[in-house]
Amino acid sequence: MVDWDGNISLFEPFKRDLDAIIEERKRPLEKIPFKLPAMKNLKFSQEEFQVLSLCDGKTAPSIIASKLCMTSYQLCEILNNLEKKKLIQRKWI
């Protein structure tokens, strides 16, 4: 890479694979192997459920946003909604 002239044509053989990876990241998560039987009376959106399933008290919000292809603003709104519903609690580290 030290002598690379910036010509991206050498990546052409990987274009289909790279496009597939990018498209996969754009698709919303369809299945999350996480069940909350005690919460069946609560109503929340698919995005809230996805965020909730990744809230473990250890994962940084930026990582959660990245995994779900969300902006930090979108994630912040969802986290605030979940906090209002008392499903999560803010933890300052």
Image (cartoon, grey):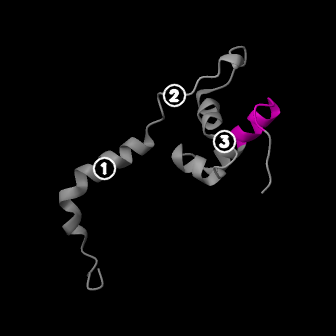
Instruction: Give the camera-side residue of 35 and 61.
Output: 35
Gap in angstroms between the C-alphas marked 1 and 2: 26 Å
Please name which of the two marks, 1 or 2, marks the residue nearer to the observer.
Answer: 2
Report the residue marked by disc 2: 33
Q: Which residues are magenta?
A: 77-88
Q: Residues within 10 Å of mark 3 (few under 14, many from 20)?
A: few
Q: Is residue 77 above or below residue 7?
A: above
Mark earlier in primary sequence (1, 2): 1
Percent across and percent down for residue 85 are 79, 29
Say which amino acid is labelled 3: Asp
Q: Secondary structure at mark 1?
A: helix
Q: In the rendered image, which quarter is residue 88 located in?
A: top right
Gap in angstroms between the C-alphas marked 2 and 3: 15 Å
Percent across and percent down for residue 22 are 37, 49
Report the residue marked by disc 3: 56
Say which amino acid is labelled 2: Pro
Say which amino acid is labelled 1: Asp
Q: Secondary structure at mark 2?
A: loop
Instruction: Give the camera-side residue of 73 and 84.
Output: 84
Instruction: Give the camera-side residue of 58 and 65.
Output: 58
Gap in angstroms between the C-alphas marked 1 and 3: 31 Å
Mark earlier in primary sequence (1, 3): 1
Quadrant for the C terminus in the image: bottom right
Q: Residue furthest bottom?
A: 3
Report the residue marked by disc 1: 19
User: What secondary structure predominates along the stretch shown in magenta?
Assistant: helix
Is 86 one of the magenta-colored residues? Answer: yes
Q: Residue at x 20, y 61 (%)?
A: 12
Q: Residue at x 65, y 34 (%)?
A: 52
Is 45 one of the magenta-colored residues? Answer: no
Mark earlier in primary sequence (2, 3): 2
